[in-house]
Amino acid sequence: MLRAARPVKTRSARPTIGPNDHGRLMTLEEFERAREEPGYIYELIDGVLTVSPTPKPWHEWWVKIVQQALEDYARRNPCEINFVATTCEVVIPARPGPTRPQPDVAAYRDFPDPPPDDWDDVCPLIVVEVISERREQKDVTRNRHLYWMAGGIAESWIIDPREDVRRPTLIALVRRSGTPRWQERVITFGKSHRSPTLPRFSLNLRRAKRK
C-alpha cells in the first residue's frame, strides 16, 4: 500500500524593501528579516522605515578620515576605545516604536570579545555623522535629539561640508552632567576639538586629512 507523501515544509520568502517603502510602519522583527534593495540606507525610527540614498564620495572620504583618527587613538589607548564601527545601530530607548539610527562612525569603550549577538547589548561612547545634502535633516536635527536619549553617548560629532566639501566645519556636541541638552561647540576647519571624553585626543580635520 502506497503511503501519501508528506508535505514539504518551506520557509516563507523574506520580503524585499526598497525606496518605495519609505514611511512604512514595521515591527523590529519585520525590519530585521527583510532583504534590502541595494543602493540605499535603511533605518527604523519610531517603528517607521526611513530610506535614504547612498552618500556621495566626499561623504565617505570624511567618514574614513574620522574613522582612521579614532582607530589610531584606539591602538594607543585600548582602555579608552577598543572598537570603532562604521556599520552599526544605536538602540534608542523610550520611543513610541523601535528606533535604531545608524551613525556614520561609532566608537565604543569596553566592547565585548566575542561581540554580542545584537546591537541592543552595546552603546557607543562617541558617534559621528557627516552631513549629506540628500539626508541633511536626519544628520543635523533628528539624530541630535535621538543620540541625546541614548544616555551612554558622551559626544556626538557632526562634520558639516555643506559650504565647502574640502574644508568642512566640525560641530562637537558634548554631554555635561546636570545639563538638559548637548553643549555645542563649532570648530572651523583647521582648528582642533579637544575631546573631554578621550584623554589626549584632539581632532583637527586639516591635519587628519594630510595623514
Image (cartoon, rainbow, N blue to C red):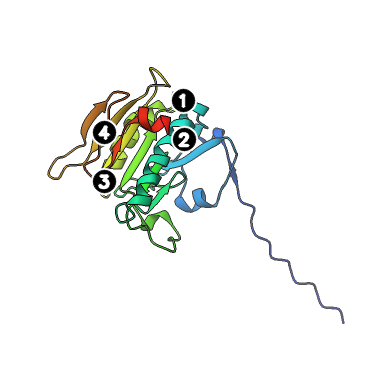
Point out residue 204 in the picture as x, y percentages from the top left corner. 32, 31
| Residue that badge 3 annotates | 198
For the residues bearing labels 2 and 3, Cβ distance under 8 angstroms: no
Dot 2 or dot 3, earlier in sequence? 2
Dot 1: within a 10 Å radius of its alpha carbon, few (fewer than 14), some, or many (20 or more) residues? few
- Identify the secondary structure beneath mark 3: loop
Q: Which residue is mark 4?
A: 193
Mark in the foreground, 2 or 3: 3
Mark sitting on residue 134: 1
Query: Split into 4 quadrants, where in the image is the C terminus?
Result: top left
- Residue 102 lies in what quarter of the image? top left
User: Which comes sooner in the sequence, label 3 or label 1?
Assistant: 1
Indicate whether 164 appears above or below 67. above
Task: Out of 65 and 55, give the one closest to the viewer.
Answer: 65
Mark 1 vs mark 4: give the one in front.
4
Q: Position of residue 160 (x, y in %)?
A: 36, 26
Question: Mark 1 or 2 closer to N-term?
Answer: 2
Q: Determine the CA span between mark 1 and mark 2.
A: 16 Å
Q: Nearer the viewer, residue 164 or 103?
A: 164
In what element is the residue under mark 1? Answer: loop
> Tag 4: residue type?
His
Question: Tag 4 or tag 1, which sits nearer the N-term?
Answer: 1
Which residue is denoted by mark 2 in the rendering?
23
Instruction: Single out the mark in the foreground, 2 or 4.
Output: 4
Which amino acid type is shown beneath numbered disc 3? Leu
